[in-house]
Image (cartoon, rainbow, N blue to C red):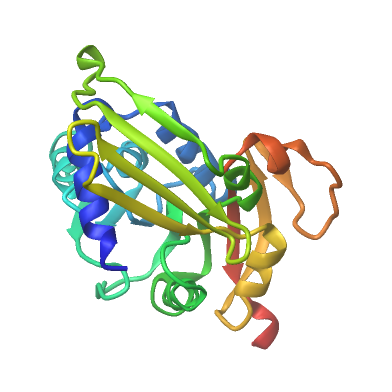
Amino acid sequence: MDWVRSFYSQTGAWWGAAEAKISDRDHRRVRLLHEHRGTRPIRVLELGCGYGTTAAAMAAAGHVVTAVEISDRARHAVDFARAAAPGRLSIVQDDFYAVQLPERFDAVCYWNGFGVGTDADQRRLLVRIARDWLKPDGVALVDVQNPFGWARWDGDEEHRLPNPELGYAHELYERTTFDPVTCTATDTWWEAASPHHKISQTLRCYSPADLALLLAGTGLTLTAVTVGDRPVDPTTPLPSFSGLLHEHHEYLAVLHHDLRGC
């Protein structure tokens, strides 16, 4: 996973001026947190916080948030911590596979990032959430890459023109591929002026059934799924459900401590 820090630092340098601002997506995530953990102030850990926009929105809603980010995007997050929610938002620039945190949390959130690395890497992170960070009655909210959405994009290539008025200063290309054997999506970017210098992110995708299998032995269990804004029972078949088949490239997995072994 050596590519992680450099990929998100480089793309953050490309897009930070445009995207390092609180948006409707961040407010939606706060609503999801409240839906699954209530509205009273709690302690929240956000993994892979990026620019820190969602962490700032959660802190502005009254929660005490610790946010971990490995890339240089954390510099934007520090600015949010100073301005948007003084005293309620702490930024830690570190690798969340290695970082040591002294407390447990009522909620652990990982928005739009799960799937980096191998199945063993995902299990290692899930074990850390269950063993080291999540309180016994806490909830983990994890965005999971949907293989059906990424498979539809296999072979797609986009040309992104600069839009300085919106903060996008670079002319970029993006190519998406999907490996149906390993269920892995690769998202590759390069600047038009440097076509031989490409950077990629690789994301392991899981259907809800595959995620439930991945969770075995981690200390966590899948209790609910949200696709778009629709709650879905992960144990109930939904043949031809368009939300997963056609509309969304990720879904929210709601995880709790697995009490069956207690």
Question: Which of the 4 quarters of the picture holds residue 234?
Answer: bottom right
Q: Could you tell me which residue is drawn at 39 percent across and 71 percent down?
A: 133
Q: Is residue 70 visible?
A: no
Q: Is residue 252 left or right of residue 12?
A: right
Q: Is residue 34 left or right of residue 26?
A: right
Q: Position of residue 87 (x, y in %)?
A: 18, 47
Q: Could you tell me which residue is drawn at 28 percent across and 50 percent down?
A: 199
Q: Position of residue 92 (x, y in %)?
A: 19, 59
Q: Is residue 196 left or right of residue 180?
A: left
Q: Is residue 234 visible?
A: yes
Q: Position of residue 143 (x, y in %)?
A: 52, 51
Q: Residue at the front extreme?
A: 196
How many numbered dots are placed on residues in this image? 0
Of residues 84 and 176, which is closer to you in this image? 176
Q: Quadrant of the C terminus?
A: bottom right
Q: Is residue 159 above or below residue 114?
A: above
Q: Could you tell me which residue is drawn at 67 percent across and 68 percent down?
A: 212
